[in-house]
Image (cartoon, grey):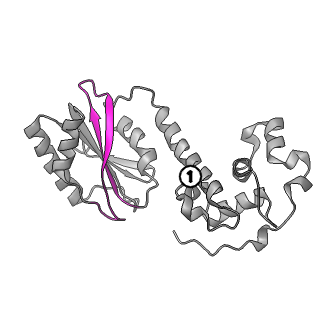
Amino acid sequence: MEIEEFDASKYLGRSVREMNPGEQPREKLLAYGAESLSDAELLAILLRTGTKGLNVIDLSRALLDHFKGLRNLSKQRWQSLKVIPGIADVKAITLEALFELAKRIQVASLGDEIVMNSPELAAAFFMPKLRDLSNEVFYVAFLNNSKVLTGYKKVSSGGSFATVVDPAEVMRQAILNNANSIILAHNHPSGYLKESAADIQLTNRLKKSGQLLNIPVDDHIIIAGDGYVSLRNKNLI
């Protein structure tokens, strides 16, 4: 995504103190509830203060405009957020922590004991972790006999189009984690919602390695944006 050079001139306006109480984010939340606030107003409460010539609401709007909306903003690492004047380390780190918490809340909604006995449940677990990444990452989930998730491990991280996965390392991690079976998961940062020939080849290699160790590969989930592909559903496992 191409980001335009930041221009603060269109945001220079009133300070928050000059606003009517009903316009101030904290007071508005107290009076009408959090759902009544815009994205910029919610961010303003977290950021707390603006900078010289740029109130905290306009600072929040600048972030949203510069990164083309809340979804793209949430993909950024804290270092990238500092392109906006007034966003120093503390504010940038606070926002990255917020976005990470949002991802974890999605996973937490699955419950304390996560059962991965269907592609839908496996995808629901990995979607928040993988959908917004700009590089390809490969995870392995470890399951017990009841298909309950006992742990997971990132085994590879690569570039925008591929990552190198060592089957020996995948199986080593499965053994170390006492897995009765495993589920593979990786992302397509391009958003292309289809398995590649390389994906199928790697899955077959891992399936054969698992058969030798009596650790079945239950599925391979590919996350692309808000969609996913299950190689199990496609009868490719």
Question: Left or right of 95: which side holds 155?
Answer: left
Number of numbered callouts drawn:
1
**Span shown in magenta:** 135-163
Q: Is residue 138 magenta?
A: yes
**x, y percentage for residue 215?**
16, 35
**x, y percentage for residue 149?**
33, 31
Type of the residue with mark 1? Glu
Point 19% across, 54% down: residue: 166
Mark 1 burial class by Cα count in 10 Å: few <14, some 14-19, many 20+: some
Task: Specify the quadrant of the image occupied by residue 235.
Answer: top left
Point 14% across, 40% down: residue: 210
Query: Which residue is labeled 1 in the image?
Result: 96
Residue sticking out furthest to the front: 89
Task: Specify the quadrant of the image occupied by residue 59.
Answer: bottom right
Q: Nearer the viewer, residue 67 or 76?
A: 76
Point 66% across, 64% down: residue: 65
Compared with 129, 72 (above or below) is: below
**x, y percentage for residue 140?**
28, 43
Task: Specify the quadrant of the image occupied by residue 11.
Answer: bottom right
